[in-house]
Image: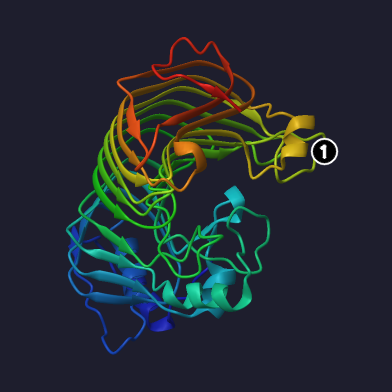
Amino acid sequence: MLFTVALSLLSLVTSVVALPKSTNPQPLGRAQDDSPALIYAFSVCSNKATIELPGHYTVGRVLNTTLTDVDINLTGTIQYTADMAYWSPASIFLTYQNATTFWLLSGTGITLSGGGTIDANGQIWWEQFARSGNAGVAGGSSRTFSRPVPLTVGFAKDVLVKDIAIVNSPFWLPTIKTANSDGWDIYRSDHVTIKNSWINNQDDCVSFKPNSTFVDVQNLWCNGSHGISVGSLGQYAGETDIVANVFVKNITMLNAQQGARIKVFGGSNDTQFISGGGDGYVKNITFSDFYIENTDTPILIDQCYMTTAAQCKAYPATLRISDVHYINIKGTSSGKLTNGTVVSIKCSQNCTGITAVGTDLRPPNGTATYLCSHITPETGLDFPCTEV
């Protein structure tokens, strides 16, 4: 196990005869570690129970929680400690891009709600990255500097998370020195619904990572992000990544790098490669009713993501992209790209079934440019392509 519980608390657990139906652990205060009390509460109320969390809880140990038919009513705050020496090696390993997490919430029939906050105390992690330049796990394969995800729902079914604020995340910022992180990340999950979220960050607003299927995303406000992103995919040679049957509707995208985005690594002839060469597909993706303002690239497909032009030319992406539909994508770009570019669809092999209707995108000045390559056919697009 990744945490230690005091002997006196273990003795208390063994003395419990009947599991309570609800519990209300009290925080110790004065920045003392409340994780033993939380771990105990999750243990004795792990089945058909309610856990009330109204206080400010300082958490200095990983939370590895498995529950069945439990309501967690977080009206207070869970704040992880700034003990990087503990968290970096001890946080729970999540496999993909060597991500780790402070809290792994597993099980069936779980509701986490209440209007409270999960505070990941990210400032110390941002400052360390600014000093060292070591991005650690984000997008790579090193665990020299693990920056945990604040909350991970994994190995779970029928889980509802609502009315919870998550702030000061350490993770998924390979290029930004002091900032928050991804809003929602979906990985190896199906039949996921995300609605009515307000996300102010500087990485993906929502990211559909490998093997995300049947996902419904609606009514999101995103500011300062990297967009609603399929991917990145195809990073690891020999791995198969799938994202399919994704519906995204009614998105406000402000001050972002991208709007509706698909990012796929290029190919490789090296079976041990960790920067491209993965297989799989992206299929049946719909981006509908986007309002976009001051965004560098409102529509982007990049099938040579983080791959040099020479490598991508020699080894085009093997991960296929098809049946991607843009409906009513409207607004303004930032004007940062040359020639008034508002759409960039760069496929290194043929992308098929790409359609766009109701597109109304403009740069701040001049005429809009729509860059395209290897789209078969282009007749489904309602804008004129300029070949890359």
Picture layout, residue 245 above or below residue 87: above
Across and down, in percent, residue 241 comes to: 59, 32
Residue at 17% of width from left, 70% of height from top? 54
Q: Quadrant of residue 138?
A: bottom right
Picture layout, residue 184 above or below residue 261: below
Q: Nearer the viewer, residue 30 or 246?
A: 246
Q: Nearer the viewer, residue 274 or 107?
A: 274
Q: How many marks?
A: 1
Query: In which quadrant will I find the C terminus?
Result: top right
Q: Which residue is mark 1?
A: 270
Residue at 17% of width from left, 59% of height from top? 115
Q: Quadrant of residue 293?
A: top left
Picture layout, residue 66 above or below residue 81: above
Across and down, in percent, residue 372 comes to: 55, 25
The outermost residue toward the front is 366
Q: Is residue 293 visible?
A: yes
Relative side of 334 to 175, left or right? left
Across and down, in percent, residue 309 comes to: 72, 38
Q: Badge 1: how crowded within 10 Å, few (<14), some, or many (20+)? A: few
Picture layout, residue 220 above or below residue 136: above
Q: Nearer the viewer, residue 370 or 112?
A: 370
**Helix, strand or loop status at disc 1:** loop
Q: Nearer the viewer, residue 245 or 248?
A: 248
- The amino acid pointed to by label 1 is Asp
The outermost residue toward the bottom is 30
Q: Is residue 188 visible?
A: no
Which of the colour schemes (rainbow, by chain, secondary structure, one colour) is used? rainbow
Residue at 61% of width from left, 69% of height from top? 145
Across and down, in percent, residue 47 comes to: 28, 51
